[in-house]
Each structure stands twice: as structure tokens, then as C-alpha cells.
Image: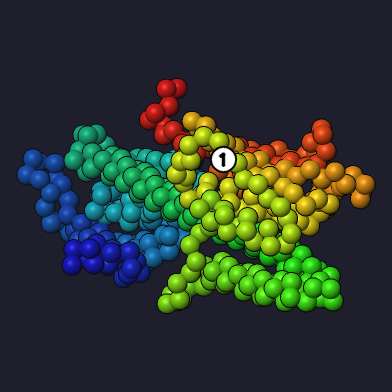
Amino acid sequence: MTTEWSQWPRRHSRAVDVIIAVLLCALATYASRVTDLGNGQGPIVARPASLAVFGLSATASLALLARRRFPCAVLTITTVCGIVIGALGFEVSVATTGAAFVAAYSLGLWSADLRTAKIAPAISGGALLITSLFHHFTPILTGGRVSLIAAILVAGAFAEAGRNRRNYLAALHARAELAERTREEEARQRVGEERLRIARELHDIVAHHMALAHAQASTAAYLLRSQPDRAQEMLDQLAGTTSAALRELKATVGLLREDDSDAPLEPTPGLAQLPELLTSFERTGLTLSLSITGVPRPLSSGVDLTAYRIIQEALTNVTKHAVTATATVRLVYSRQLLTISVLDDGTEAAEHGGGEQDSDSQGYGLIGMNERAVSVGGHLHAGHRPDGGFEVTTELPLEPPHTPDREDDPS
């Protein structure tokens, strides 16, 4: 209830202006009847109501209705009306010239020129103060003149406080807008990162299964006439490969949907599924060997998935590009790092146009593997071996990188 009443003047500013204008006109008209005889008895009602004072007060009060749009012009009109009231022989006081001080406050609050907002009210107050001296010069420091000086100071103080509050609220609003834009930009950045992650997943899944499917289909076509039983077995494996590809694609693309599906998705692949991965490549005729050095340790989900995908992509490149039938996967666990090496002999690759490095330079395989490694704080190196063949080596941290908080920063 209190909040609603506090917001009422702001929501009904025109009604507030009308009420102020009526009250100031009535106050000035009544104050024109009051005079101070200087006998120590104080002000008394000694005059009838003046039609001229009423007209001047009404003019000044009506001008206040435009004080928000034309504050400087309104201050000029109200000051002139106050001076004319004093020239007619009436006392110049806060009561008779109250409209001028309301206009001074409005100018200090809404004027775009700060210099004018500070100087013009002082000039207006000084002119009214000088006009009051023409009524009776002595004593100089009467209660009416002191009230004029106080009114000038109070109007300036209220205007400055109102301007500071308005600037403060504008700054808060600007900061809120900036924070909102920052949140939107951060959200767009996260969406972009998520799209990139899904694109990497799709690339790895499609490249892996398409390479296997191509190898199985080629082998089946080669064995179809000479060994139909082997060809049938290879075709059965091809059906399983395509089914696995569809399941992984469904699981990955299903992350983009908002509806909750009752169908369980496959778990995120990791090194626990490495034997199944190697078996799928061996079905294409590739001879693989796996060596593990050190004590295997549990990995974070991000590092585990990265290790699996890098091995998958490296073996896919061997299947697609290398002229070889053997490859080796090495896992070396140290205290802080997991080193993964995928290498092939590739003795005939150079004779067929540069092998996997030339082919991958036209695609995104090595780029994707490197980005995956960097995303978890590791790094990747790929290139030809001195004794022939191609090698992909990756060093991944066993724990995700830790970014110290500001409180932990000794600087």
C-alpha cells in the first residue's frame, strides 16, 4: 500500500502539477493581504484581496504546467511575475513568489545545461531579493528576506539531489542492460560451443562407422565369388556396423531435443569401451595390438571421452588412408598424464601419395583431435615416423585443469 502511494505522484504528474499550481495561486493571493507594520507585532491581514496579484499568481501558476518541457522559460515567467508583484507595492516573500522557486527547482532538475541549471536559479532568487528591498529597505535581514535566501538554497539542493538520484538510477539501468547483454552473449557463446562439440561428435561417429562400413563392403564384394560364406559373414557385420552408427547418431542428436524421451540413451563412450572399439576395426581386416604401461586410473568424463574419440579417429584415419594392415595403440599412465600413441607401419604410404597426412590436411580429422586435446588441457602431435609410418601422440591430464580463484592468487 505504501509503495503504491509513493508511486502515485510519478504516475499522475499532470494532476500533481495542477494541484501545486492551484495551491500556489491561492497562497500568493492570500499572502498579498498580509503585511508587516514593523512594530514588533508580526504580520497582520491589513489589505483586501488584490485582483492584480491574483492574475499574476495565476499566470505564474499556469506556467508551471510546462515546467518539465520548458524549465528555463517557466523560470523567467514566474520571476517576472514576482518582480511585478513587488513593484505593485506588495511584499516579496516565499508565499507570494512560490511559483518562481518551484520553477527554479524544475530547471535545476531537468535542464540539459548544468551551467544554466545552477546560474539561472541564483539570478532569479537575487532579482526577487533585490525587488524586496524596494518595499522597505530597513531592516535588511527581515524574516521574509531570510526565507527568500533559504528558498533559493533549498530549491538548488533538492534539484541537485533529484538530478543525482536520476543519474544513479540511469546508471543502474545501464548496468542492468549491460549485464543482460553479457548474459545473452555468454549464452550465445555456450550455444556455439555446444554446437561445436556436437559437430565433433557427429564427425567422429560418422567417419568411424562409414570407414568400417566401406571396408566391410569392399571386403564382402571381394569375397563374394571366391568365399561366399565369408562374404555373408562380412555383410552381417556390415549390418551391425550401420545399426551401431544409427544408435550413436540418435543418442547424439537426441541431446538437441527438449522433450524427455523414455528410451534410454547409450552411455558416453570411454576407455572402458576400448576393447569393443578395437574389435570393430579388427573385423575390417586391420591387425591391432594394445599395450598399457602403468596402473590405469579413473579419468574425468571429459578426458575419458576425449581419449576414446582420439583413438577412434586415429584408427579411422589408418583404415581410410594408410596402406597397411597393422596398427598399435599404446596407453602410458604416469602420475599426472595419460599418454596415448596410435601408430602404424605404413611402409607403402609414401608410395601412394603421402598417406594419411596429405589426406587429413584436406579434412578436419587432425584438427578435431587437436581441439579435443586442448579442450581438456592436453596437447597432440601427429606426423610421419622416421622409420616409416604415421604416429598420433596425445598427452592428456589425468585430472581436469584447475583455475585458481582470485582469493588464491598471491598477487
Nearer to us in this view, 48 or 64: 64
Quadrant in the picture for the N terminus = bottom left
Colour scheme of the rendered structure: rainbow
State left or right for residue 156 relative to residue 326: left
Q: Which residue is drawn at 48% across and 62% down?
A: 267
The residue singled out by tag 1 in the image is 292
Number of numbered discs: 1
Residue 300, image x, y percentages? 46, 46
Query: Residue 38's quadrant in the figure?
Result: top left
Nearer to us in this view, 390 or 187: 390
Q: Which residue lies furthest to the top in this view?
A: 411
State left or right for residue 409 relative to residue 344: left
Residue 321, image x, y percentages? 81, 54
Quadrant in the picture for the C terminus = top left
Q: Can residue 97 be seen in this view?
A: yes
Query: Residue 256's quadrant in the figure?
Result: bottom right
- In this rendering, is residue 17 above or below 121? below
Q: Residue at x 44, y 33 (%)?
A: 404
Q: Is residue 55 visible?
A: no
Residue 74, image x, y percentages? 43, 57
What is the crowding at mark 1: few (fewer than 14 residues within 10 Å), some, or many (at least 20)?
few
Q: Which residue lies furthest to the left in this view?
A: 41
Nearer to us in this view, 124 or 80: 124
- In this rendering, is residue 336 above or below 205? above
- Secondary structure at badge 1 equals strand
Residue 385, image x, y percentages? 79, 36
Nearer to us in this view, 405 or 100: 405
* Dot 1 amino acid type: Ile
